[in-house]
């Protein structure tokens, strides 16, 4: 579904992505790990066609080259991005926030029905009661869940989640991950998630990448990482 070939990423003269190769299969749940500054967000920006950074190399989505396309064309092709800094519209109601995520009735083939407002409220029931409140009145965890459901309203076939649990209390973080798992179960959306190393999350992943200094230094099944604490320490400084 997503194929990244020999991708180099630059901010001006500074190279922050080096010869990145990734292959993400349809329906997969993929984890992307790495220390601060290793290049994870830059890779997501590169996939979305956002500038900066600039890129060299190839990114293909559903067999079509998307490198160099403008961000709206990449979003319309079916890639949904939830950035690090939950971008909700604080002065609009929650329902309006959700509606702004909706795109034309197009949705991925194989999906029974598009993801709609009813689904947003089903996966995150608390939203329904709050639907006439302003976005700014929500807690951090609620804003994160709103951002994810709003992105799903665009019916992406690939979802990029950049540190969805950052700064949240552990129980709230777990709620966010559980919501993502529920959405995946019902909508089979291929997902790449950037996260802190977490055994809870690792259990559900089909594949893991670890980046360091802009390069991919690990690409394998999470079980390989899970059972090898020395490797965890070496790759991520945990364990
Ligand atoms: N707009 C920018 N201009 C110049 N350099 C940048 C810019 N954004 C990021 N960088 C640099 O690119 C490198 C990779 O940053 P990036 O944000 O992609 O890392 P990350 O893995 O997402 O880190 P974190 O875990 O802290 O979110 C870092 O050295 C960072 O300082
Ligand atoms: Mg980042």
Image (cartoon, rainbow, N blue to C red):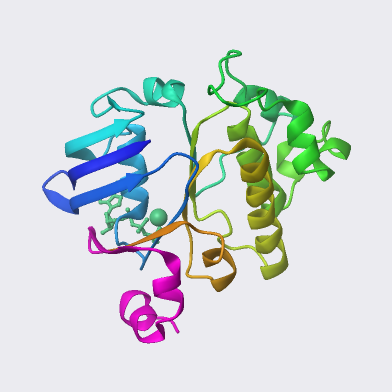
Residue 217 highlighted magenta (yes or no): yes
Q: Nearer the viewer, residue 141 or 79?
A: 79
Q: Is 79 above or below relative to 35?
A: above
Q: Nearer the viewer, residue 219 or 152?
A: 219
Q: Residue at x 55, y 72 (%)?
A: 199
Q: Is residue 32 left or right of residue 103?
A: left
Residue 60 highlighted magenta (yes or no): no
Q: Residue furthest right?
A: 129
Q: Nearer the viewer, residue 238 or 87?
A: 238
Residue 49, image x, y percentages: 31, 31
Q: Is residue 159 left or right of residue 40?
A: right
Residue 123, image x, y percentages: 75, 42
Badge count = 0
Residue 90, image x, y percentages: 67, 36
Quadrant location, ligand no. 1: bottom left
Q: Is residue 43 left or right of residue 125?
A: left
Q: Is residue 83 visible?
A: no
Q: Which residues are magenta?
A: 212-239
Q: Quadrant of the N terminus?
A: top left
Q: Residue at x 68, y 29 (%)?
A: 97
Q: Quadrant of the C terminus?
A: bottom left
> Could you say which quadrant of the image residue 132 lies in?
top right
Q: Is 108 above or below relative to 161?
A: above
Q: Residue at x 73, y 35 (%)?
A: 120
Q: Is 15 above or below relative to 169?
A: above
Residue 14, image x, y percentages: 14, 52
Q: Is residue 14 visible?
A: yes
> Could you say which quadrant of the image residue 10 lies in?
top left
Q: Is residue 89 left or right of residue 72?
A: right
Q: Residue at x 69, y 47 (%)?
A: 182
């Amino acid at each position: 579904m997503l194929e990244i070939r020999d991708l180099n990423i630059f901010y001006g003269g500074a190279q922050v992505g080096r010869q990145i190769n990734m292959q993400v299969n349809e329906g997969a749940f993929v984890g992307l790990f790495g220390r601060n500054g290793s290049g994870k967000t830059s890779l997501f920006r590169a996939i979305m066609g956002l500038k900066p950074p600039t890129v060299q190399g190839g990114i293909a989505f559903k067999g079509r080259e998307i490198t160099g396309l403008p961000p709206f064309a990449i979003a319309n092709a079916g890639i949904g991005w939830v950035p690090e800094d939950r971008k909700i519209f604080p002065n609009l109601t929650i329902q309006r926030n959700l509606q702004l995520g909706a795109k034309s009735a197009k949705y991925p083939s194989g999906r029974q029905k598009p993801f709609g407002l009813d689904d947003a409220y089903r996966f995150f029931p608390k939203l329904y009661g709050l639907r006439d409140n302003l976005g700014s009145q929500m807690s951090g965890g609620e804003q994160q869940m709103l951002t994810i459901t709003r992105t799903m309203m665009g019916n992406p076939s690939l979802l990029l989640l950049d540190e969805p649990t950052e700064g949240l209390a552990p129980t709230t973080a777990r709620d966010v991950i559980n919501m993502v798992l529920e959405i995946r179960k019902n909508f089979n959306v291929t997902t790449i998630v950037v996260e802190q190393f977490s055994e809870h999350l690792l259990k559900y992943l089909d594949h893991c990448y670890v980046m360091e200094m802009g390069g991919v230094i690990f690409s394998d099944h999470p079980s390989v990482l899970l059972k090898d604490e020395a490797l965890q320490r070496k790759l991520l400084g945990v364990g």
